[in-house]
Image: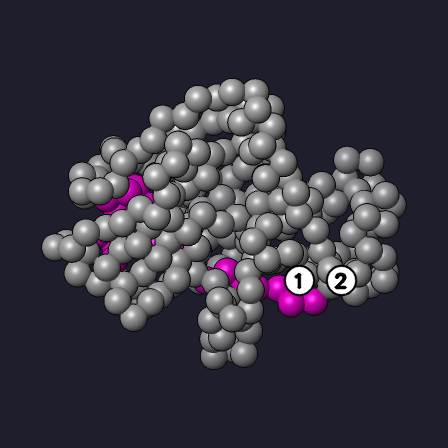
Amino acid sequence: MEVIKKHFPPLKKDYGCEVVKDLKRYESFFKKLDLRSPLWINRRDKGITGSGIPQKCHGDSFLLKKLYGGNILHGYAVSKEDKGIVLYHHSVWITPEGNAVDISTRKEHCVKRDDGKMYVRFIPITEYDGSDIFTDFSQLTVPYRYQREEIRSSFGTPQYYIPNYPYRIKYKNITQQLISYTENYVNEMEEFYHKGGFTEPSMFTGLTYEESLEKYGVFKGGENRPS
């Protein structure tokens, strides 16, 4: 298992989701980081796929890929605050049908839209199949007047970095950290990315995640897996 970091070309697919239209003010900032416009990702709320452990989004997404297939989508969740926006590293699950869904964001951090469902603003950066391990993307605090005020990176430790920096951005106080890819570090990141869990059984079979994986998991050759 290798830890990797690289420049990611912008993803253009919408993954069955609507484009967010209430962050137009920050479009020039997104473009400077080679990031696409955010998408509204539906937060599932029932069964296994709606009961991922909060703050274990990378591991939860990886576990669902093991059970049902599909893929993992890395990127930035975007929180709209009074004085700007905050971008934090997040993963969502791509279903076998190609749709992106959120499985682990705390409900209080979601946005309830007109259809009555909960959503998360999310910028896709790269699809991920679990064969490599990414270092964490630095959390970014972007003020309302970001053209004139300082953009802050919340992490200064070496394991965090900003994807696509410094390709098209020169804002002060944002730095790209170098990493020493030691064996111990790789092991720590593997546990971080592949550890998660689910609190509810399947709506259709009543089986827990572990029971479902044993019976239907794609890595075990299962077919016709219930969701």
Q: Are marks 1 and 2 in contact (CB under 8 Å)?
A: yes
Disc nearest the viewer among 1 and 2: 2
Q: Which residue is mark 2?
A: 200
Give percent across and percent down for residue 188: 58, 32
Residue type, label 1: Gly
Task: Say which quadrant the N terminus sits in.
Answer: top right
As rendered, which of 152 and 50 lies closer to the eye? 152
Q: How is the image coloured?
A: one colour
As rendered, which of 56 and 20 lies closer to the eye? 56
- Between the C-alphas of marks 1 and 2, the distance is 8 Å
- In this orientation, does residue 133 appear? yes
As rendered, which of 67 and 89 lies closer to the eye? 89
Give percent across and percent down for residue 113: 47, 75
Badge 2: how crowded within 10 Å, few (<14), some, or many (20+)?
Answer: some
Give percent across and percent down for residue 223: 82, 44
Residue type, label 2: Glu
Q: Which residue is mark 1?
A: 50
Task: Say which quadrant the C terminus sits in.
Answer: bottom right
Is 166 one of the magenta-colored residues? no
Is 29 one of the magenta-colored residues? yes
Q: Residue at x 39, y 36 (%)?
A: 157
Q: Is residue 105 above or below residue 164?
A: below
